[in-house]
Image (spheres, grey):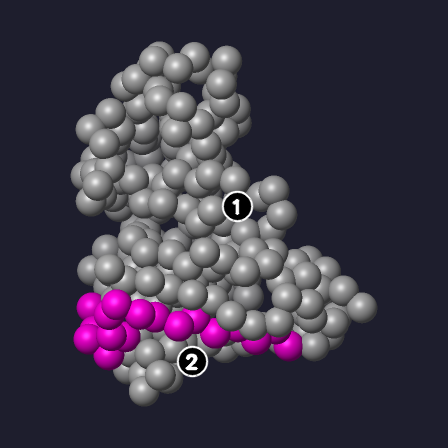
Amino acid sequence: EIVMTQSPATLSVSPGERATLSCRASQSVSSNLAWYQQKPGQAPRLLIYGASTRATGIPARFSGSGSGTEFTLTISSLQSEDFAVYYCQQYNNWPTTFGQGTKVEIK
Amino acid sequence: QVQLQESGPGLVKPSQTLSLTCTVSGGSISSGGYYWSWIRQHPGKGLEWIGYIYYSGSTYYNPSLKSRVTISVDTSKNQFSLKLSSVTAADTAVYYCARALRSQYYFDYWGQGTLVTVSS
């Protein structure tokens, strides 16, 4: 099973600032990586798939990069609605696995 | 717009079987191209994939849960279901149903989730 490790566990950012979230895979997952946003009491929402392709309706301030074992989700200018928990998911190998999440909180 | 909705008991006794159903609207399970999946989230924790079913009935389960999991599909009702046997308190979680593309297994549509508590 591929282990996905996200860092940091919590990121404190001021509105309007840039946020950079990391996700590392225990072995290569090529570009088969997705990012999700989850707000309290809600289901996760797909943000990015294929490591860098934004899902339908996702604002351009969200961008993904990386391949192999190292991936990054960048939120260029944090809006109030972006404070949430973010998860990465690899779907290169079975079983698909998720990271433990990064909480983006207001500084 | 595809929508998924979980339903089932919110409380299950230890050693019994947890049963949930996901009703899909806005799209047909029989259309193919998608894996219909179950994912759970323990309170305050991350996400754990349980398994999927294709409209044909083929399944794949997480090895960590495989011995206790059964996922089935009823295309006539546009529903798929989860059964998890011999539950313990460790199975207390929010259970989500979700859709994933068959070609790339990321989840593009999710149900709202349902909390299942295992307690006597």
Residue B51 position in % (x across, y down): 43, 66
Of A30 and A48, nearer the camera is A48
Q: Mark 2 — residue?
A: B72
Question: Label 2 lies in what chain?
Answer: B
Mark-to-mark CA distance, 2 and 1: 27 Å
Q: Chain of mark 1?
A: A
Q: Residues in magenta? A: B17-33
In the image, which is nearer the foreground, mark 2 or mark 1?
1
Local crowd size for mark 2, using a 10 Å CA cut-off: few (<14), some (14–19), many (≥20): many
Residue under numbered circle 1? A41
Q: Residue at x 24, y 64 (%)?
A: B102
- Residue B69 visible to an observer of this rendering: no
Amino acid type at mark 1: Gly
SS of the residue under disc 2: strand
The answer to whether any part of residue A78 appears in the image is: yes
Q: Amino acid at mark 2?
A: Ser
Sort mark 1 into few (<14), some (14-19) or many (20+) by Cα contacts within 10 Å. few
The residue shown at (43%, 12%) is A14
Q: Write down the quadrant of residue B103 in the picture.
A: bottom left
